Image (spheres, rainbow, N blue to C red):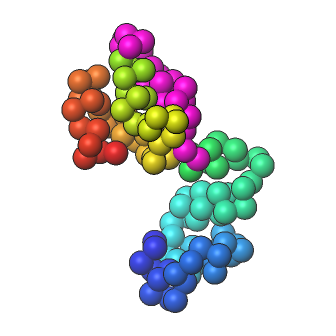
Amino acid sequence: YAWNLEDQGMKLWVQWKTWSKDDLKNKAEMSDADATFCHAVLECNKDRPDLVRKFQTPEFADLQSFFQKRFPEAIEQDAQTFAVRLTDGAGATHVSCLQVERYLEQAKTVRDAFTNMEKGL
């Protein structure tokens, strides 16, 4: 969708952040589901904190929790190692909650999750 927006001269999100859901569908050529999702995020819709949360960067404990949820059979040390590998010394990361969740969904095994981190995240 970014290409569609840029082609229309909308290079910055502030240029379209006030658009309605229908504007997003028509002008950005988004599907109904994607326009609904995008509109809720742009508005910081209080009824949909689950959507807004996906774009936030996770904290160290969140990373551990995501890993443990995906691999309940894994030992606690694996979850900690996963979080350490994704964070800097201050516990900050460069990826969003959504990116981590999608990455972990694709990992078939704990080993898979560790092996592909560099290219997947």
On whether residue 63 falls in the magenta region, the answer is yes
User: Where residue 26 sits: x, y (%)?
Assistant: 57, 79
Q: Position of residue 41 (x, y in %)?
A: 65, 57
Q: In front: 48, or 15?
A: 15
Q: In the displayed structure, would residue 90 be above or below residue 28? A: above
- Residue 88: x and y in percent read 44, 38
Residue shown at 62%/44% (left/top)?
53
75 vs 109, nearest the viewer: 75
Q: Which quadrant would the C terminus be assigned to in this image?
A: top left
- Snapshot quadrant of residue 75: top left
Which residues make up the magenta segment?
Answer: 56-77
What is the x, y in percent for residue 57? 55, 44
Residue 97 in view (yes/no): no
Residue at x 42% of width, y 20% of height: 80
Q: Which residue lies furthest to the right in this view?
A: 46
Q: Residue at point 60% right, 57% down?
A: 37
Q: In this view, does 19 lie to the left or right of 64?
A: right
